[in-house]
Amino acid sequence: MSNMYLSDPPYALWSIWNMLSVSQHAFIFVLGALCIYAVFVSLSTIQHLRRIKIYDPELETANERGLKLLRKRCTNLRRTIEALFCLFGVVLFLHLQTIGVYVMGSAVEAKILGAFRLNCAFATNVIAVFFVLHMVQWIVAGRVSTYSECLSKRDF
């Protein structure tokens, strides 16, 4: 019984790719672009924080402007992730509505269950990616806040 859940339904994105719809394929490509953007923003933010870490009184104003820019980048990334999460909900629930299409024919329950399992596998993969993106953004934003506090304490 438990062996059935290991191979059927296929949970890995690459194993369900051929069964996904065009809108789900498009969403995965947008999600991939968001992942690339998140990595770029995260790495550039960490790199910029390392430069700010070395205190130089002559660059204090530039460091404050840099931290403001980093906060703005983190906010934009968070909002982009939140917007894409909402889009994911739209795509998922649009496809879950199609489960009722299978009314006629033999083994109706099997068709309905198969479609439901496919959409659940799709949701599992996307939610896992969103969780990782959220954690990365949270960690980077936390580091920006820490450096901001350290910089503001130096003023006193």
Image: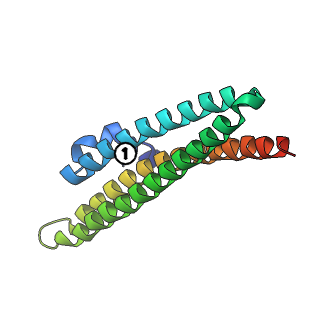
Q: Quadrant of residue 148?
A: top right
35 on left or right of 22: right
7 on left or right of 21: right
In the rendered structure, which amino acid carries the disc numbered 1?
Leu
Q: Is 85 or 5 nearer to us in this picture?
A: 85
17 on left or right of 41: left
Q: Quadrant of residue 18?
A: top left
Residue name at image x 75 percent, y 44 percent: 146
Hey, which residue is sitting farthest front in the picture? 58
Q: Quadrant of residue 111?
A: bottom left
Q: Is 62 or 131 nearer to us in this picture?
A: 62
Residue located beneath label 1 in the image: 31
Q: How is the image coloured?
A: rainbow
Q: Say if residue 150 shows up in the picture.
A: yes
Q: Position of residue 12 (x, y in %)?
A: 39, 41
Dot 1 surroundings within 10 Å: few (below 14), some, or many (20 or more)? some
Q: Position of residue 22 (x, y in %)?
A: 19, 50
Residue name at image x 69 percent, y 41 percent: 143
Q: Say if residue 2 shows up in the picture.
A: no
Residue name at image x 15 percent, y 66 percent: 106
Hey, which residue is sitting farthest right in the picture? 156
Vertically, is 100 above or below 37? below
Vertically, is 105 above or below 22? below
Q: Position of residue 13 (x, y in %)?
A: 36, 41
Q: Position of residue 32 (x, y in %)?
A: 36, 39
Hey, which residue is sitting farthest left in the picture? 105
Vertically, is 57 above or below 77? above
